[in-house]
Image: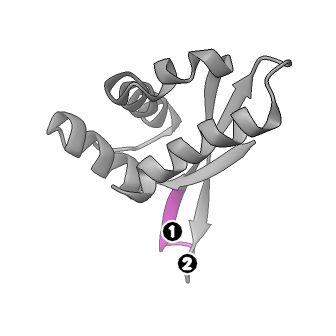
Amino acid sequence: MKIKVESEKIIKAVKKLEGIEIVLENLDDAKEAINLICQRTGLAAKHETTKLKEVKVTSYQKYETTAVNYKMIFLLEFVFEEDVAFDARVAAIKEFQEFFRGV
């Protein structure tokens, strides 16, 4: 399963957690920011019991009106062990999404 997170939400989350205003220029910047967020919030560690193996980050650009006016959208893919119940997966993903909604 994947969720989408706009770059502004990631920037605000790092600002809130660390007091640092970062710039997301590319996918590597976003991966570092997501790793930082997972560590500082404890979200990844909290879901070790659900056997969350990894949060993969990919990106795409969403064009609002023109080729010049776009938003960077990052997709967070949650990779779990195979034997994790569907409800446990959904609960873990929902908690990540709620965190970004609250930023």
* Magenta region, residue range: 66-72
Asked whether 2 or 99 is in front, the reply is 99
Classify 78 as above or below 8.
Answer: above
Three-letter residue code for mark 1: Tyr
Q: Are marks 2 and 1 in contact (CB under 8 Å)?
A: yes
Which residue matches tag 1?
A: 70
Res. 28 in view: yes
Q: Position of residue 17 (x, y in %)?
A: 23, 37
Q: Is residue 10 left or right of residue 15?
A: right
Residue occupying image coordinates x 81% and y 36%: 86
Residue occupying image coordinates x 35% and y 30%: 41
Check the image and name the residue furthest to the left.
19
Q: Position of residue 8 (x, y in %)?
A: 37, 57
Look at the image and say whether residue 78 sits in the magenta stretch. no
> Residue 33's image quarter?
top left
Circle 2 SS class: loop
Q: Position of residue 69 (x, y in %)?
A: 47, 74
Classify 26 as above or below 42.
Answer: below
Which residue matches tag 2?
A: 64
* Neighbour tally class for label 2: few under 14, some 14-19, many 20 plus, Cα within 10 Å: few
Residue occupying image coordinates x 85% and y 18%: 83
Res. 75 in view: no
Look at the image and say whether residue 71 sits in the magenta stretch. yes
Structural distance between the alpha carbons of marks 2 and 1: 6 Å
Circle 1 SS class: strand
Asked whether 96 or 74 is in front, the reply is 96
